[in-house]
Amino acid sequence: MSHKIISREQLSENVFAIDVTAELIASAAKPGQFIILAINSEYSERIPLTIAGCDTEKGTIRLIWQRLGKTTAELADLKVGETIENIAGPLGKPTHLENFGLVVCVGGGIGNAPLLPIATALKKQGNKIISILGARNKELLILEKEFAAISDELIVTTDDGSYGRKALVTEPLKEICQRKQKPDKVFVIGPTIMMKFCCEVTRQFAVPTDVSLNTIMVDGTGMCGGCRVEIDGKPKFVCVDGPEFDGHKVNFDLMLKRLNAYKNNEQKALEQYKNHKCKIGLDKKKSPDSNGGEII
Amino acid sequence: MTEQKRQQLLDELLEKQKQGQLKPADRFAIPCQAMPQQDAMERRNNVEEVTTGYSETQARLEAFRCLGCKTAPCVAGCPVRINIKDFITAIADGEFAKALGIIKENSLLPAVCGRVCPQEVQCQEKCTVGLKFKDVNKAVSIGRLERFVADWGAEQNEKDVPKIAAKTKMKVAIIGSGPGSIVAAADTARAGHDVTVFEAFHKPGGVMVYGIPEFRLPKKIVQKEIDVLEEMGVKIIRNFIVGRTRTIEQLMSEDGFDAVYIGVGAGLPSFMGIQGESLVGVYSANEYLTRANLMKAYKFGNGSDTPIIRAKKIAVVGGGNVAMDCARMALRLGAEKVYLLYRRTEKEMPARVEEVHHAKEEGVEFHTLQSPQKIIGDENSCVKAVECIKYQLGEPDESGRRRPVAIENSEFTIDLDAVIIAIGNGANPLIGQTTPNLKLNKWGNIIVDENCKTSIDGVWAGGDIVLGSATVILAMGQGRAAAVAINKYLSEKLSERSGDN
Ligand SMILES: Cc1cc2nc3c(=O)[nH]c(=O)nc-3n(C[C@H](O)[C@H](O)[C@H](O)COP(=O)(O)OP(=O)(O)OC[C@H]3O[C@@H](n4cnc5c(N)ncnc54)[C@H](O)[C@@H]3O)c2cc1C
Ligand code: SF4
Ligand code: FES
């Protein structure tokens, strides 16, 4: 049962979105869950991607990813009508949704993609939503319009000031925590380093903060332990115990190291893939900039 | 012994047999037939199967060693009660097809079982010949003979697709596709039911494809069994995680399944709970083997996109078959030094003697009576060394094995690039978490009755999720027992329905 790409968009230089058929997953998925895909059954690696949206009528799911290593590059090269052989899911525990009151949703980079369905669901639960979206520059900011539609307040930051406020997301987050009405809950999804610093901010104000972790995975059913992280000093498996955890209990430093375990291998695989494509004259694009082994 | 000499001996035995003069003493005099295998130094560099299998002459000579005991004690040692005496006699007679038929009456996967069953603690342990020589290694090599006939059958290229009874329209869901599930699927499909296998991975076969390495069990053997299932009309749905994609409740109440067999295997690898276990380069055995086997990481950059750390110096912690598989896989992935760290002595090791022997031949260094108590990382949080402590054996514990006791101040360190933790598995929690009313024991294993039925009506379970980490043959045995019960349940349901009409 392969999965056909129904539509494809390039959201920025290295960020892509597809809608792909996966009827069963579309009907079962809840905000916060993810899938594991393998483009080809014989040679591909298995990578986790968060579900950025579902269309139960069309039976499709939306995936958004950043081109980093070989697999994400190969995925970016697939065209509408082409297929992904394997998609398994929905995996992980759904987000715990309730009416917390005032909720801050912080998205960084392509973390905005998995954050959107969560923020939307939180809004439906009656929460007041403040969204903070961060990107390196204007070009890389995604889903601003969609967030604007569901947020009571929207703050955009860019690292270089090319759009919105020139700041890291932690700055407005801190200011909001200092307001008279302190947030009741914070959700952060983005690069691990960003989640770490956001948690350091909210810890000072004792605001409960959930983060969604993106570790390396293999099976996604709790069998291999490759996705383990340290929560409160104890090992937990992101694929079955997560992906969302209390951010104040996550050992981010260790997680950052584990994410880089295969950095050299990934670089090698990507080079090989690009060389191969050059040889067959397909690739005229610029090489993607890598910021570590992280795939969100 | 050269093949020519063997042929000569076989001819003599056949002649004697014809004359009615073949005595037990003649049988005892036949040398045990060694299993041909790849040279150790060569094979540690490839993933091809280590053992290459008996020739016809060897198989018949080995079969002539069997006394054909009236009581056939070997059969009692076999978890699925294969009619061992008769199949061995058929081999001695050169009637291989007949031998295969006899095995298949009880076992669906002889090519697998012949390779991976621990015969030395099952059928061969009970064998009269071994008892006579007071050495289980001198028992009739029942496993090798089983493998021989299975491989012979495969070479004949005859597709052996079992007959299917008239269709019943009853729907059976089989969860997981390990050995227990394969048997349960085949046996329920044979009864005419509409059977669907749901597998979480993108390839079916369970531990036989993701855990047990190619060099012990070539994947094409498992694939062949899967092909047979599909030819029997069994649907295999890959990438389907029961509990997430659909729950058991949904399968039964919304998707119309009348019966369910749960064979999801062990999951949740155990770690030691020591410092440094989350460092880069610490693997569970499951992860290491899944990357290496299922994802073919040994071909990384050349036919596989899945990476694995190519450690030069690596330690494997544990003493079971899984630990042996990891250690031997590490060699094949280019390790120069592979240390096996085990808290007790070799005598207590749960691994099969054959595996220990193969591992040693290939150059795995056994460090017994020691175990890591801390894994040390470098500035990048990559494994740099392990700190071990030495043990001595104390009083026997509940299991009867002598308990290892740490020796004070005996710490020492070993420099390493990677560590594999192969100390066992807990139960896979997903089905339990998503199936209300399914009774589990305190370790999370599913509780079943003698027919493998669970606490939920219409739901059976077997294999590692019930037994804890067990064996292929025990899983198969439970798959078969469950199938018998499922077939009975469904035929009763059917007659109820026709009674209603
Ligand atoms: C490395 C290793 C070496 C071994 N060596 C030997 C040996 O030499 N001899 C021997 O007899 N035994 C050996 N064993 C043990 C043996 O493999 C197992 O006892 C046996 O495979 C258990 O079979 P099972 O039917 O329980 O299913 P398993 O083989 O455990 O397969 C379970 C399947 O279910 C799937 N699954 C899990 N959760 C779900 C879900 N929620 N939905 C759908 N599918 C799911 C899994 O992906 C898997 O494919 C070894 C085990 C390992 C790990
Ligand atoms: S116990 Fe040994 S000798 Fe006797 S029938 Fe079985 S295999 Fe043959
Ligand atoms: S990905 Fe294997 S246990 Fe989580």
Image: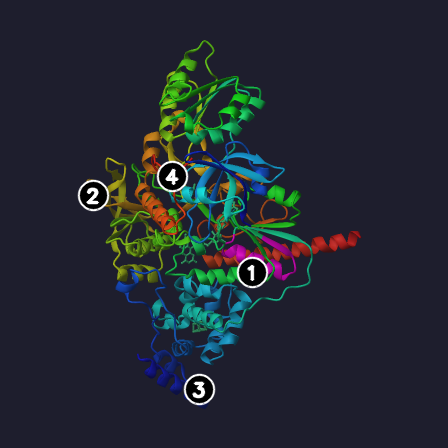
Mark 1 touching mark 4, by CB under 8 A?
no
Q: CA distance from mark 2 to mark 4?
A: 38 Å
- The disc labelled 1 sits on which kind of residue? Leu
Q: Is residue B436 visible?
A: no
Q: Along the line of sight, which residue is nearer the eye, A136 or A224?
A: A136
Q: Residue at x 46, y 35 (%)?
A: A241
Q: Secondary structure at mark 3?
A: helix
Q: Secondary structure at mark 1?
A: helix
Q: Secondary structure at mark 4?
A: loop
Q: Is mark 4 within 8 Å of ligand 3?
A: no
Chain where mark 1 sits: B
Which residue is under mark 3? B17
- How many residues crowd around disc 2 within 10 Å: few (fewer than 14), some, or many (20 or more)? some
Which residue is under mark 1? B229
Chain where mark 3 sits: B
Give the number of the disc on residue A68: 4
* Sequence-first disc among 3 and 1: 3
Which residue is under mark 2? B413
Which residues are the magenta region? Answer: B177-196
Which secondary structure type mostly characterizes the magenta part of the structure? helix
Mark 3 touching mark 4, by CB under 8 A?
no
Q: CA distance from mark 1 to mark 4?
A: 40 Å
- The disc labelled 3 sits on which kind of residue? Gln
B108 to B246, vertically: above or below:
below
